[in-house]
Image (cartoon, rainbow, N blue to C red):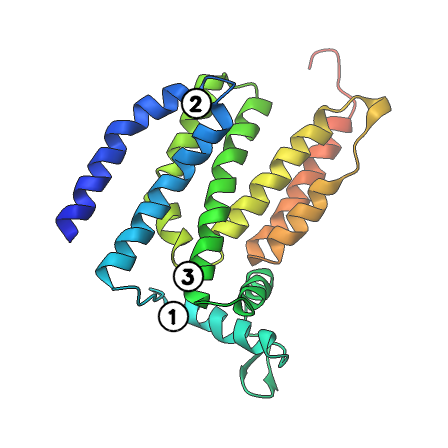
Amino acid sequence: ALGWVSVVARLLLGWRSAIMGAVLNRSRGLPLLLLVALMPPLVFLAAEAYLFDGDWQFPLDDSWIHLVFARSLAHGEGLAFNPRELVAGTTAPLWTALVGLLAALPGSIFLWAKLAGIAAQAGSVLLVYSVARRLALSPARAAIAAGLVAASDWLVWSALSGMEVNLFVLLMLAGLDRHLRERAAPPGAALPPLSFLLFGLAALTRPEGLLLPLLAAADRLLLAAPRTAEE
């Protein structure tokens, strides 16, 4: 079984350069970039299903903690690890709430959480391309940046781990993409500061996200500050 996984991984590496070249074609770029983003986690999800005969599991204790809180939310018991004992025991309340919603769906909550992580990873890859283009990178370099994120073993593993990492990355990149749009808008056509909302949601996913709106505000202040002729 491990040999089969190795063969698939090698095939993916062989196809990656050809697919990334096709991504540069604007008419087919988005679907192909999405394919590049989805292939690694879906392949490993299929390998997990094969190796463990569909007995879905999480690799970390923290993933199980999120799951316990999520099930309590789904059953109307609030943020409780033990029945009827409300505690602030999760550092990722937004992810816990999302998993709580998924727990109400039919089927395995383990599989739903993994699919949510895969969706967040795919969205992150697309946003990396968008952010790179807003930073004036060429389409080729933006595609390379997106491809590196799609091939990141840590992010692919996290997508299947039941953890909040990929949702945090998705919201952080969405906020950054929006921040760059707002920053580039002409004075007479200013956009609503939705980037701060996205950064706020990121902070509800991981506590270090609290730095994001502060950094965005500092960037706005620097942009608005008058500059001397020498600058």
Residue 35 lies, in percent from the top left, at 41, 35
For label 1, the crowd category at 10 Å Cα-Cα, with few meaning under 14, some 14 to 19 and many 20 or more, is few
Direction from residue 118 to residue 175 in the image, left or right: right
Residue annotated with mark 3: 111
Compute the Cα span from label 3 to label 2. 29 Å
Find numbered disc 1 in the image and state the secondary structure of the residue it sits on.
Answer: helix
Q: Comparing marks 1 and 3, which lies closer to the viewer?
A: 3
Name the residue located 53 percent from the left edge and 75 percent from the top edge.
71
Q: Which mark is drawn over residue 61?
A: 1
The residue positioned farthest toward the left in the image shown:
3
Q: Quadrant of residue 83?
A: bottom right
Residue 13 lies, in percent from the top left, at 26, 32
The residue type indicated by label 2 comes to Val
Find numbered disc 2 in the image and state the secondary structure of the residue it sits on.
Answer: helix
Residue 12 lies, in percent from the top left, at 27, 35
The residue type indicated by label 3 comes to Leu
Residue annotated with mark 2: 23
